[in-house]
Image: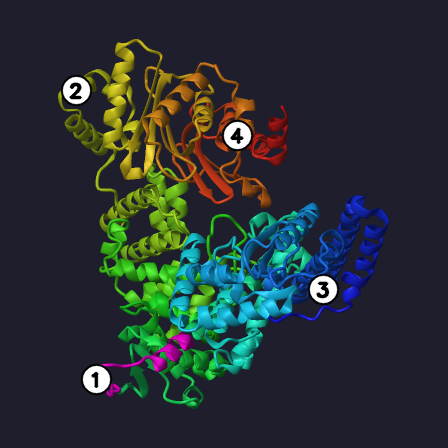
């Protein structure tokens, strides 16, 4: 955009010396000199790149200088080749007017923004079609560029063709818009530029802006539609380089600006905003250069495995509570956020400029509607605006008020007012933060009835949010270096508030029926909104963010205006916001002790209602696909059982009554097959009847009966289980040691992930095992071929027809990027969580068939697995097993527990994975 000055240019490439060398080679070698000329050009190119790489290493944030340097290097190479071809390969003494050629750099090359492996985009323009000399010269130049290993995007058109195609093709029009003269016939370039301005641009400004914005929106949708996705695309992602380029294109098209700095002169940016523009652009260009250098290719995705390397190259260091890579990514997202703010202000100004030039016709042509007043603000055209430049300076609490009014009245905020708010956000000091009026306004906005999510995002973009709630400012643009969280902490929080608002308005009843009902039963709606705001407020402080967040809540809630009861509730919710999901996903909900322990921590129905709502929005706001019906079902079961226990002071029915009720319900489901119950019901113990839902018991009884009638030793049945968003796999077989790990191995080999498992043994020694499985995308196996593959794979594994260990080791992880993370395996034992079982939890880096290896380790440790609960948090797996020893008792001896721990750690280690892969 602004052609940077390249210091010590001849250290990058000395064109005069290179041209002299090539002229000498051409004179000495004649037609056979070409290989030597290519070698000389290649040596110059490689030396120039090496010099620029050295400069990037010395000054790792100089994005403009390095990208401009690469464009300068290519310029000199292209000019040298052109002059050699015209002088030595296809010399023409008396060229006709048709034998003229101009070389125009377009794309990133045209903007002088080239990363080390960017394409070289050149437009060859000549006066007329079918000029043989022009085609020969173009072909010769291209062959030289290809021989140098450059990836060239090129076009060859006459002036008329160029103008005609620019009129109909947005891509060509944009390319010419940022075209830059490189070499050749200057007059021809000037002619194309003049005709482009007169014949293409003039009168099409509005359409160009509309087309560019639609193109941008489509690109955002492809890239995740958030500038806070944790693996951003530096070039095409929201808030990335392409968004900055779009602003420049629009400004240049409408106002004919030559360089980005001219956007200040035409009033689209202030000087301070332009400096922000350049800072953000320079940083992102530098990041892109580092990505290209590290990978040796044109890589624009800032993936997890590259984030550490780029952070190190850009000299980011660890700090207490925040790693180097998290600090680097936080800075990246702050730049992306700034791009978003600039985009909003810029486009709103463009819109306003168009509105001023719009011609009114008809009876109302002379009528200008007046702005109405709202608490001193001007409201016009659906926008709220401050009445003057000193509005916020005179009363800084208005910085909160303007956003509250926008949310309450469904208004947008005028771009000039947004600009003022960003400029004046520093006026929010201690006295404003403790102003009761300002806090009341903030609380009204937070719990707004219209669209608090959007308005809070605007507030965050201006910096007002972080100034008013400094603890929120600390998590602004903060990423969490893992594969589970899709967004930065501030974006996750604002999305969670938006989800809470939608649940309250009844828009998500199908996905969240309990939360949609409970939110209208809670005592304080503002308390749940504050709890959602604060649940992750203490992340990145180097301690347990739940505990630290509780302390923040105790300090902030009274400031916001919450009473003592609301403050105590919010502080507890923040401290316990992970309790419900951990219990539902990692514990056996059919074990009475699980419910007792959970209820003892929750203690009241009011807390439970709020915790259910907070848990739902927290999980869903993590990212797309994180919430599913399986999680909803488990949380619902826990909520219902805990609610019953809290309301009655005990479980409604004792063990015998619950088993009898289950049998009665199963009898109804079996219908004309209810006779199977008389034959087989007594073979299943009470634990089975309590653990399994009625519909699964009915299926199990049918399959158990069929297996016995056919005197088959094995029954494998798979079917979709819609209420859990998974596929139910039932295996009935003669029980024997190692059955569980073999079934798990067969399921993994079929490409499925186990999310829950219940293992039962009948009184007659038969195993009845139920597994819930999903594909790597978290969806059920539903096609007939998939179900058949599951059944065959399990049967083969149990019959030893497949070598499980080597085959499983070769299977790739569904998330191969998990290797970018350091996750040390941890094994914990809990003999208090269950009355009958020892509960073992293993946390480890997710990898191929981890569950199979852990199950085998438990088998080799002479343990019986009764249920398994499988949870994944991105790259991290958390697998919980309810086990007994071979005699049916808990595992208690210290030496025994230590030996089991070592076996499980070995099974989940990277070294063990490497051994298996090399076996």
Colour setup of the view: rainbow
Q: Mark 4 falls on what kind of element? A: loop
Magenta stretch, residue numbers? 348-369
| Circle nearer the N terminus (1, 4) | 1
Task: State the residue at coordinates (44%, 17%).
Answer: 796
Front of the two marks 1 and 2:
1
- Tag 1 residue: 364
- Tag 4 residue: 811
Instruction: Give the answer, above or below, for where 435 lies relative to 589.
Output: below
Task: State the residue at coordinates (38%, 66%).
Answer: 210
Instruction: Give the answer, above or below, for where 429 lies relative to 534.
Output: below
Counting other residues with Cα less than 10 Å from the Cα at mark 4, is it few (<14), some (14-19), or many (20 or more)? some
| Circle nearer the N terminus (3, 2) | 3
Tag 3–tag 2 contact (CB < 8 Å): no
- Label 4 to label 3, Cα distance in Å? 42 Å
Q: Quadrant of the C terminus?
A: top right
Tag 1–tag 3 contact (CB < 8 Å): no
Q: Mark 2 falls on what kind of element? A: helix
| Circle nearer the N terminus (4, 3) | 3
- Label 1 to label 2, Cα distance in Å? 79 Å
- Tag 3 residue: 59
- Tag 2 residue: 673
| Circle nearer the N terminus (1, 3) | 3
| Residue 776 locus on image (x, y percent) | 43, 37
């Amino acid at each position: 955009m602004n052609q940077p000055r390249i210091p010590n240019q001849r250290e990058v490439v000395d064109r005069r010396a290179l041209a002299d060398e090539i002229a000498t080679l051409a004179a000495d070698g004649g037609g056979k000199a070409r290989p030597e000329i290519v070698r000389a050009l290649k040596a110059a190119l490689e030396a120039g790149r090496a010099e620029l790489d050295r400069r990037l290493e010395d000054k790792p944030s100089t994005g403009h200088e390095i990208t401009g340097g690469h464009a300068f290097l290519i310029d000199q190479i292209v000019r040298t080749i052109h002059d050699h071809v015209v002088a030595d390969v296809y010399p023409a003494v008396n060229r006709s007017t048709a034998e003229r050629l101009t070389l125009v750099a377009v794309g990133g090359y045209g903007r002088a923004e080239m990363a080390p492996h960017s394409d070289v985009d050149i437009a060859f323009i000549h006066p007329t079609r079918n000029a043989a000399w022009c085609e020969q010269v173009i072909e010769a130049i291209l062959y030289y560029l290809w021989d140098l290993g450059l990836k060239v995007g090129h076009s060859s058109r006459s002036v008329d063709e160029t103008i005609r195609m620019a009129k109909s093709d947005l891509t060509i029009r944009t390319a010419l818009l940022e075209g830059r003269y490189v070499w050749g016939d200057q007059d021809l370039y000037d002619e194309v530029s003049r005709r482009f301005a007169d014949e293409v641009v003039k009168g099409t400004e509005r359409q160009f802006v509309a087309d560019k914005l639609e193109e941008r929106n489509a690109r955002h949708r492809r890239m995740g539609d958030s500038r806070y996705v944790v693996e951003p695309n530096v070039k095409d992602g929201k808030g990335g380089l392409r968004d900055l380029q779009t602003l420049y294109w629009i400004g240049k098209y409408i106002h004919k600006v030559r360089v980005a700095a001219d956007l200040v002169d035409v009033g689209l940016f202030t000087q301070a905003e332009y400096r922000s523009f350049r800072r953000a652009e320079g940083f992102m260009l530098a990041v892109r250069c580092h990505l290209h250098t590290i990978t040796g290719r044109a890589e624009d995705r800032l993936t997890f495995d590259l984030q550490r390397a780029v952070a190190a190259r850009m000299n980011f260091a660890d700090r207490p509570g925040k790693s180097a890579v998290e600090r680097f990514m936080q800075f990246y997202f702050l730049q992306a956020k700034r791009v978003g703010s600039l985009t909003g202000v810029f486009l709103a100004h463009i819109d306003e400029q168009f509105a001023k030039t719009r011609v009114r016709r008809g009876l109302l042509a002379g009528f200008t509607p007046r702005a109405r007043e709202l608490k001193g603000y001007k409201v016009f055209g659906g926008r709220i605006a401050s009445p003057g430049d000193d509005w916020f300076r005179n009363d800084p609490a208005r910085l909160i008020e303007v956003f509250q009014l926008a949310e309450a009245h469904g208004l947008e905020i005028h771009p000039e007012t947004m600009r003022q708010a960003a400029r004046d956000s520093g006026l929010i000091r201690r006295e404003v933060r403790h102003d009761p009026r300002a806090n009341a306004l903030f609380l009204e906005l937070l719990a707004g009835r219209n669209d608090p999510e959007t308005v809070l995002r605007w507030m965050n973009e201006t910096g007002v949010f972080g100034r008013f709630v400094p603890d929120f400012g600390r998590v602004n643009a903060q990423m969490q270096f893992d594969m589970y969280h899709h967004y930065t902490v501030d974006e996750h929080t604002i999305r969670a508030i938006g989800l809470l608002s939608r649940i309250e308005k009844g828009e998500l009843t199908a996905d969240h029926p309990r939360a949609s009902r409970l939110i209208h039963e809670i005592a304080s709606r503002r308390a749940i909104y504050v709890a959602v705001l604060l649940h992750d407020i203490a992340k990145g402080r180097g301690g347990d963010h739940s505990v630290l967040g509780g302390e923040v809540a105790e300090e902030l809630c009274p400031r916001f205006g919450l009473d003592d009861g609301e403050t105590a509730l919010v502080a507890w919710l923040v401290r316990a916001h992970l309790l419900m999901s951990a219990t539902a996903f990692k514990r056996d909900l059919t074990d009475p002790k699980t419910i007792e322990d959970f209820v003892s921590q929750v203690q009241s129905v009011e807390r439970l209602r709020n915790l259910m709502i907070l848990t739902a929005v927290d999980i869903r706001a993590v990212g797309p696909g994180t919430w599913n019906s399986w999680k909803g079902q488990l949380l619902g079961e826990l909520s219902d059982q805990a609610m019953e226990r809290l309301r009655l002071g005990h479980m409604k029915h004792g063990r015998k009554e619950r088993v009898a009720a289950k049998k009665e319900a199963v009898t109804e489901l079996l219908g004309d097959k209810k006779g199977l119950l008389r034959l087989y019901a007594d073979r299943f113990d009470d634990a089975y009847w309590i653990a399994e839902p009625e519909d699964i018991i009915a299926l199990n009884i049918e399959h158990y009966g069929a297996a016995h009638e056919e005197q088959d030793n094995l029954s494998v049945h798979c079917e979709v289980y819609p209420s859990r968003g998974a596929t139910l796999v039932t295996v009935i077989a003669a029980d024997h040691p190692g059955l569980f790990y073999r079934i798990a191995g067969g399921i993994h080999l079929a490409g499925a992930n186990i999310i829950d498992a219940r293992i039962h043994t009948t009184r007659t020694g038969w195993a009845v095992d139920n597994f819930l499985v999903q594909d790597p995308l978290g969806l059920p196996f539903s096609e007939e071929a998939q179900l058949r593959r599951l059944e065959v794979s399990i049967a083969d594994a149990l019959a030893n027809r497949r070598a499980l260990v080597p085959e499983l080791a070769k299977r790739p992880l569904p998330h191969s990027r998990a290797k970018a993370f350091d996750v040390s395996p941890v094994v914990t034992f809990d003999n208090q969580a269950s009355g009958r079982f020892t509960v073992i939890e293993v946390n480890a880096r997710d990898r191929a068939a981890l569950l199979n290896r852990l199950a085998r380790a438990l088998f080799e440790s002479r343990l019986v697995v009764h249920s398994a609960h499988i949870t994944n948090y991105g790259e991290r797996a958390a697998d919980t097993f309810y086990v007994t020893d071979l005699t049916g008792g808990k595992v208690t001896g210290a030496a025994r527990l230590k030996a089991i721990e070592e076996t499980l750690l070995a099974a989940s280690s990277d070294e063990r994975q490497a051994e298996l892969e090399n076996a």
